[in-house]
Image (spheres, rainbow, N blue to C red):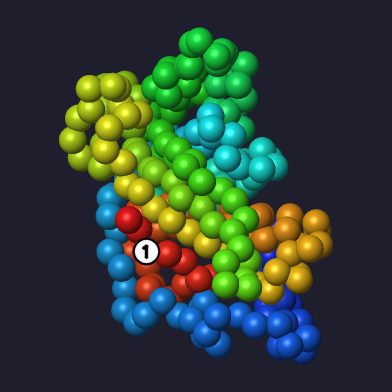
Amino acid sequence: MRYLTLLVLAGSLLAAIALTGCNIVGPVAAVVAGPGEIEAEYRLEDRPTVVFVDDRRNKVNPVALRRVIADRVTEDLMRRNLVSQMISPNDAMSYAAAHDSAKDIMPIEVVGRAVGAEQVIFIEMLEFADQTADQRSRGVASFQVRVIDVANRQRLFPAGGGNGGPSSGSARVLQANTLDLSPDMYQSRAMRSQVREMLAHEVGDRTAKLFYKHEARDLGGRLEPR
């Protein structure tokens, strides 16, 4: 329901911008990503799974949006019956927060095991910020995704091992962004908060779509993966 509210907000923003004369880049460029379907990049095994958002660089502000990202992935996978048992992301993030220290970061496989997960969808945030350029502002994010086998301490996606443990080495790097808005609209703290929440949902949406076939048409302008 919360995401539906944000979709309505996005539509309202478009209408408001049209009425006030503010500009959005391309009349349909933010909505149309092209025809056809995109295949899943990885098929998740049906095992107890938890989504974990790693934001040790403190890029996501406010921090509550970490939960928004993880919940969006969890809800999408459950709605499509891709995994029959999804564990609450809050359990995993709360456990890590309680046991992490500056000198001793809890390995993600230990966190997963503690909450009863057999695999972890590990999202590491690289950037989550407002960006202003060419008289337009938007929310932008970059992040990398791995799927980790908890019991065997192996990275399942992307394929291939890593010397630094399952949460290091190769990862699927993605980028996402919100609609371009006039900087005038960004002057409102409430508007910036709404845009950042929409960006969090976009990060979750892009992550979940790694795991199922989906339409290329997508809501919200977005950058292609690096």
Q: Could you tell me which residue is drawn at 70 percent across and 42 percent down?
A: 62
In the rendering, at what x and y percent does residue 136 appear? 62, 71
Q: What element carries label 1?
A: loop
Q: Could you tell me which residue is drawn at 46 percent across and 50 percent down?
A: 142
Q: Could you tell me which residue is drawn at 35 percent across and 53 percent down?
A: 211
Q: Could you tell me which residue is drawn at 28 percent across and 50 percent down?
A: 42
The answer to whether residue 126 of the structure is visible from this angle is yes
In the rendering, at what x and y percent does residue 193 appear? 73, 55
The answer to whether residue 74 of the structure is visible from this angle is no
Give the quadrant of residue 23: bottom right
Crowding at dot 1, Cα within 10 Å, few <14 / some 14-19 / many 20+, comes out as: few
104 left or right, relative to 61: left
Residue named by callout 1: 224
118 left or right, relative to 127: left
Say above or below: 195 vs 181. above
Say above or below: 81 vs 170. below
122 left or right, relative to 25: left
In the rendering, at what x and y percent does residue 16 appear? 76, 82
- Which amino acid is tagged 1? Glu
**Residue furthest left as drawn:** 160
Image quarter in which the N terminus is found: bottom right
In the rendering, at what x and y percent does residue 52 appear? 49, 35
Image quarter in which the C terminus is found: bottom left
Say above or below: 177 vs 164. below
**Residue furthest front as drawn:** 134
